[in-house]
Amino acid sequence: MGWILLFIVALGLLAACVQAGAAVSGSPADISSTPPAAGPSSSAKTSARQGGGSKPGGTQTIPSCFFDELAAKAVAELTLPPHADDWTKVRAAYVYVVSRTWYIPFDDPTLSASWQYLDRCGHAPTPYQVMATSPLLYGIGSCENYACALMLLLDHMGFETLYVPGTTYSVEGAMVEHAWAMVRIEGNWYHIDPQLEDNVSQGMLQYKYYLKSDAEFSAHHTWASLLAQPTEYDLSLPDCPETTLPPPSETLVKKPEPALPQAVAAAEALRESRGEAVGVPPADTLPPFPEV
């Protein structure tokens, strides 16, 4: 009888160990149900997956991402009121990009010298992050730079955005290649075009190209299936059924126009100070940035 009793006790201890191990390790369902920590932007989430190390003692550290820092700095300069609603945030970002960016052609050597380099997180930036750099750091850019700078700020604040290549009318009345953005607010998508707004402002910000519907934008923009594009960029864009009532016109206070040679020198100095290789995305991965 003694050995039977010992056998029963041993089985009980084994079962207790199995249950304890299951409680510590967790089932796949238990692990997947734990929500991930929220990050300020998609590139920050990417950095958490791709970069990172450990501090002594095993505490994981995530390296700071250059483009998240760039967006965070710009958003801090918006001086938003506490608990600002989505409409206030989008408007502030729009005014910020328009007021600090001076237009130069896409093929200007100042831009074609490019600002493409690896992020501090150790991965190549997206083309959209690259295009956002020149307005936010140096105050210059073409239509795609305006659009991407606005997207970077809005993405950082938690909005969904899309980059839209298309065409619009030039000053001479011809259709030319162009780019702008779309943003989703409270479930609805809207067209938003900061570069064209800047082009027609003449010292007054009138919000002519701010949060507009498909119907209104189609009077002066074409996009998606109306354009010949590579298959992967034959955009199936969401509908923009509504136009918002524009805010009152206001004086546009532009940041002083930068001296282009100094902007180029600053870009080169930044790259050298970072001590990182230039990260140029392969040509076949770039979206169809128009050469306006």
Image (cartoon, rainbow, N blue to C red):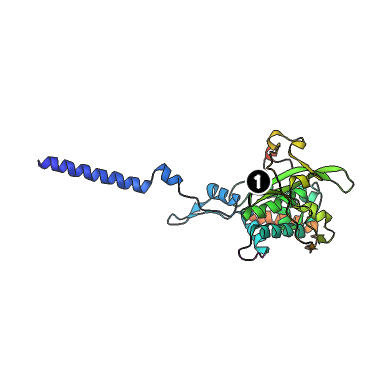
Which residue: 43% across, 46% down? 31
Q: Quadrant of residue 99?
A: bottom right
Question: Is residue 81 something one can see in this rendering?
Answer: yes
> Residue 100's x, y, as percent?
76, 60
Which residue: 69% across, 43% down? 239
Which residue: 23% across, 45% down? 13
Position of 62 compared to 150: left or right? Answer: left
SS class of the residue under badge 1? loop
Q: Quadrant of residue 66?
A: bottom right
Residue 253 covered by magenta stretch: no
Name which residue type carries label 1: Thr
Position of 8 compared to 271: left or right? Answer: left
Residue 81 covered by magenta stretch: yes
- The N terminus is located in which quarter? top left
Q: How many marks?
A: 1
In the image, 171 versus 138, the foreground residue is 171
User: What residue range appears in magenta?
Assistant: 79-83
In the image, 49 versus 224, the foreground residue is 224
- The C terminus is located in which quarter? top right
- Disc 1 crowd, CA 10 A, few/some/many (<14, 14-19, 20+): some
Q: Quadrant of residue 178?
A: top right
Question: Is residue 117 something one can see in this rendering?
Answer: no
In the image, 231 versus 289, the foreground residue is 231
Residue situated furthest top in the rendering: 231
Residue situated furthest left in the rendering: 1
> Residue 63's x, y, as percent?
55, 54
> Residue 81's x, y, as percent?
64, 66
Report which residue position mark 1 lands on.
126
Q: Is residue 63 above or below residue 167?
A: below
Main SS of the magenta segment? Answer: loop
